[in-house]
Image: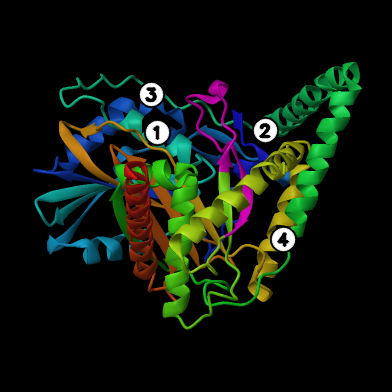
Amino acid sequence: MDRMSTLDAEFLHLEDTASHMHIAGVCTFAGEPPTLAELRDLIGSKLHLIPRYRQRVQPVPLELGRPVWVDDPHFHLDYHVRHTALPRPGGDDELRQLMGRLMSQPLDRDRPLWETWLVEGLDDDRWALIFKVHHCMVDGIAGVGLLTVLLDLDADAARPEPEPWEPAPAPSAPALVLDAWSGLLSDTGSFVAHLPAALHDPGAALTRAGQLTEGMVRMLRRLVFTGRSSIEGGIGPHRVWAHSAVPFEHIRDIRQTLGGTVNDVVLAAVSGGYRRLLEERGDDPDSTEVRSLVPVSVRGSDADGITDNRVSALLLDLPVEFKDPVDRLVEVQRRMGELKGSHMAEAAEMVTQFGNLAPPAVVGAVSRIGLRSQHLLTQRSVTTVTTNVPGPQFPLYCLGREMIEYLPFVPISYGVRVGTAILSYNGNLAFGITGDLDNGADVEVLAQGIVDGIADLRSAAGDAAEHLVEGARE
């Protein structure tokens, strides 16, 4: 039995009929699609490498422990690998509608929490795979890792032989409780084991405690309510999705000339996209706060191959009030620099670590009460989520067909009507925008606004470079 961490379990607690906690990706390919049987055989041959794909969630009686992963005795690949087709020629509008429909359906808790859809009928002689997996199984980086397992690095890669598999017997209720409490003792023991090191160097321990306290105070200060706007508020059960992409070299050109990190450039462009979205909706971007949760990976080298969530977070106020794109980039750099030095991410990570020591029944009850309260008074501390995941910078293949595009999807929740997922793949940077169908069906405005924001920054970088050349000549 593998126990969930508190963070993994929280993604289960945060899910209800309106808030679905799965992440996803659309992978497009050119040429003749494989048959459904060929795709099932391919995935079946890789399942021994990703055992979680044959396991389901098993709650512990009376919530005396966090949920565990157990083998599904009724696992059948046909249930998880599915087929659909768009009316030919299926363009981006039809693909976006399909994604919105598939992402509006929760995953079945009684089965392993994933689906793969083979989609035929795309225009330009294309087809697609849609991978959908619950957030309690993976974070963005682990999800990319899973994709590199399911697909191949070589067009001529030999298909491995499937390994025989028999589900392990389901644990009894007493065994679940015993495992939960022994696991809690183990977590507590690991925590206590670090105390001698702190006592050995009390000065360093006090400094670290001060940093974590500072980070926690800064985070709490950023949880004050933002002003009302059209992009925050309650959500319904239906999703809408849009996407856009740019060559990754455009980001490098901007960064080399105007400074900042790749993430700074991307966040500046996202800020420009939100400014346009607010203007289109009649909101005043000069007086509207757009506070984004920005996930930060804390996945160490020891976590390679582990499928779970290893993330913390920063809370960034996107500088939508700046009209000039270069001013937005400079302000993003300044604000991100402050956040990185604020110890906010370390404080958020500490909270999740302490959560592993808390009684699961208390954590679950608090989470459910908080979720129910969202139906009455939606949170207004976080306006949106912006997640940037580095993907493989080399081509992947499915049964000899090269993947030409990788488009991401991020879930939204109460108070967060719009979310942005960013993912790089083989020289391109893709943006996937999730919206609530009832309150945010115009998310393509944001998708296009981000691309236009990058174009504006690239133009400014070109002008700056030209001025430097002219100055050198003089």
Q: Residue at x 55, y 35 (%)?
A: 69
N-term-proximal mark, 1 vs 3: 3
Residue 299 forms part of the magenta stretch? yes
Q: Nearer the viewer, mark 1 or mark 3?
A: 1
- 287 relative to 306, above or below: below
Q: Which residue is the site of mark 4?
A: 223
Which mark is first along the chain, 1 or 4? 1
Numbered disc in front, either 2 or 3: 3
Q: Earlier in the sequence, mark 1 or mark 2?
A: 1
Q: CA distance from mark 1 to mark 2?
A: 28 Å
Residue type at mark 4 is Leu
Hey, which quadrant is residue 366 in on the image? bottom right
- Name the amino acid type tagged 1: Leu
Report which residue position mark 3 lands on. Answer: 48
Bounds of the magenta span? 296-317
The reply to whether dot 2 and dot 3 touch (C-beta < 8 Å) is no
Q: Secondary structure at mark 3?
A: helix
- The residue indicated by pointer 1 is 146
Mark 1 surroundings within 10 Å by alpha-carbon count, few (fewer than 14), some (14 through 19), many (20 or more): some
Who comes first in sequence, dot 4 or dot 3?
3
Amino acid type, residue under disc 2 in the picture: Leu
How many residues crowd mark 2 within 10 Å: few (<14), some (14–19), many (20+)?
A: many
Q: Which residue is mark 2?
A: 176
CA–CA distance between discs 2 and 3? 24 Å
Q: Is residue 42 visible?
A: yes
Q: Element type at marker 2? A: helix
In three-dimensional space, the C-alpha distance between marks 4 and 1, rounded to whole angstroms, equals: 34 Å
Is residue 411 among the parts visible in the rendering? no
